[in-house]
Amino acid sequence: MLVQRKPDLTYADVTPKRLYMGRRNFLLGLLATSGAVAGWRKLPEWLAGRGTGSVPVPLEGVVKWPGSTSEPETPIEKTTHWNNFYEFGTDKTDPAVNARNFQVSPWSISVEGEVAKPRTFTMEEILKLAPLEERIYRHRCVEAWSIVVPWIGFPLNVLAKLVEPTSKARFVAFQSFYDSRQMLSSGQAGIEFPYVEGLRLDEALHPLALLCVGMYGETLPNQDGAPVRMVIPWKYGFKSIKSIVKIRFVKYQPQTSWNLENPREYGFYSNVNPHVDHPRWSQATERRIGPGLGLFNRRIPTLMFNGYGDQVASMYAGMDLRKYF
Ligand code: MTE
């Protein structure tokens, strides 16, 4: 009797055609070098540390978050091939090339400081802490550009609850992974490493502040902050720290990489604010990186708190947002 075997799953089987066709050319290159077809079967391998993490794999059981924007998504090939990740280069096209072999497995995050139950979470544990949600956020990325991205993750406050911050915790300090063998030196990049960021405790616990493990249905590509990063949609892109290894609850306002580098240009709060110009460019408008050709990106007015004012403005009531920029 002839037994017909079901073929292995391919990207085309598990990825919506719209996404699959859009990134086919990039993936063909990656798939050719990996010598494997990336299907759901690769997830355990990625978690077990045998893969490099350079080929994103589909995330299962992702639920749609009802607050997503309905604006057109920025195509994945644009989001992943023009961005900032200074550990892998200072040009916006560098991270996609230089982060290719970044070792993202095994991975863990140490959560410590002013907490009753300090704990180290492995990546496997993080993925199981809460249902993964797809949240389509508009996101202010580099300089006056913006993108619309289907991020995947869950609120950071889920993880925070497990470690029980004490009454002394007023801020949260984040630290990225750093390894001089895989990454630029601070001298080459022009900023201090490891990359550090910070939020006030109420900002970090806000339901919009996303602990992000994926985008466009899959685990994060290395250049976008694999395997775990923050996405804070009402703040400028640099607050969204990538490849996190340490989260520390602290009493005092922590240092942040761009504020250390240039305090005149980059404040601690960094809320999207069209009324406060960056010293070198206006913040009043932005160019949306959309599905079309870059030449025709039109300028659109930038919204206070990036359009998330209804949800977040009350956290800044009574603050002079020109002083606390
Ligand atoms: N995180 C680390 N570890 N290193 C970086 O250089 N760059 C920041 C932020 N997070 C950066 C980082 C800056 S300047 C920007 S604009 C965003 O990442 C870019 O994020 P994106 O790839 O989602 O556009």
Image (cartoon, rainbow, N blue to C red):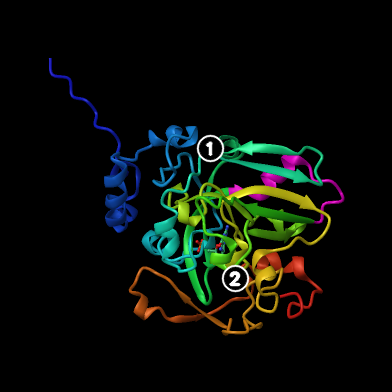
Find the magenta span and give its range: 154-170
* Mark 2 surroundings: few (<14), some (14-19) or many (≥20) residues within 10 A: some
CA distance for labels 1 and 2:
37 Å
| Near-viewer residue (151 or 103) | 103
Determine the secondary structure under disc 2: helix
* Residue 270 visible within the image: no
Identify the mark at residue 311; answer none if there is no mark: none
Identify the mark at residue 106; answer none if there is no mark: 1
Task: Pinpoint residue 48: horizontal percent, then vertical percent.
Answer: 48, 32
Give the labeled residue for mark 2: 307
Residue lying at the far left in this picture: please name it. 1
> Upstream in the sequence, badge 1 or badge 2?
1
User: Which residue is located at x 66 percent, y 58 percent?
Assistant: 196
Label 1 close to label 2 by CB (< 8 Å)? no
| Near-viewer residue (54 or 210) | 54
The response on whether ligand 1 sits within 8 Å of label 1 is no
| Near-viewer residue (297 or 171) | 171
Quadrant of residue 42 in the image?
top left
